[in-house]
Amino acid sequence: MKVSPSVISCKLEILKEQILESVDAGADSFHIDIMDGNFVPNLTVGADFIRAIRKVTDITLEAHMMILDPEKYWKSFADSGADILYFHYETPFDFDSVHKRIKEMGKQIGMVINPDTPVDVLKNFLTRLDMVLIMSVYPGFSGQKFIESTPEKIRELKEIIDEIAPHVRIEVDGGVTDITGRLLKESGADIIVSASYIYGGNIRERIGILKNI
Ligand code: DX5
Ligand code: ZN
């Protein structure tokens, strides 16, 4: 299982240390939660934060944009060092133009769907996506409880992906622990995001557990 720790639960005063420890423990990428206080009721970080992390590590960086106007900001996140740009289906943006420009930059594009959004909406985009991110909590905060119907949703998506776009990887975000992670693996997830589980305990041990799930 590939593991993408979300830095939202890192301790800011020792961020660099925790990032390097996570990389050393086998993290496959880092997940950066960008919240604007509008699309979700919380505020986090922006381009400067991505640029600072990029200086510390070469690892793949994902920008999970929980913002009302991703079209206005995605380029600054890409220029700051984000390798994967995640757009929420529920926010307005011109997919064709964004897709074209991201591919011209040699970066990857992903689409995210909220718990109440059905996987069907992804069908029109799948062949042009690199990744899909399935929310297993309502976005906005770390430390929430995993929505139990998520594995079923992943199975449904996996069937569609196998049929029309087998190159697309499935990532899942929210409430991932050693227990829910196993359910996600069984249902076909390729990558799991985890914040409070990893950074609420021994980082090395917990990344190891998730990777070997
Ligand atoms: C939720 C974020 C997630 C979240 C993960 O809005 O997109 O990345 O912070 O946190 P945990 O793993 O604690 O659910
Ligand atoms: Zn996220």
Image (tube, grey):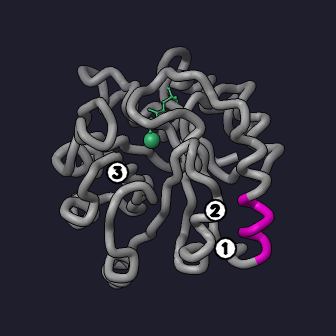
Mark with earlier residue (3, 2)? 3
Assign a secondary structure to mark 3.
strand
Three-letter code for the amino acid on which mark 3 is drawn: Met
Which span of residues is magenta-colored? 157-163
Question: Where is residue 131 shown, x and y percent of the image?
Answer: 55, 63
Name the residue: 62% across, 72% down: 123
The residue at 71%/26% (across/down) is: 178
Q: In the current view of this chain or complex, which residue is farthest to the top?
A: 201
Task: Name the quadrant containing residue 170.
Answer: bottom right
**Residue closest to the eye, 35 or 121:** 121
Asked which quadrant contains residue 25, the reply is top right
Q: Are marks 1 and 3 in contact (CB under 8 Å)?
A: no
Mark whose residue sits in front, 3 or 2: 3
Instruction: Identify the element where label 2 is drawn.
Output: strand
Q: Please state which amino acid type lies under the numbered disc 1.
A: His
Residue 197 is situated, as x and y percent measured from the top left of the image, at 56, 22
The residue where tag 2 is placed is 169
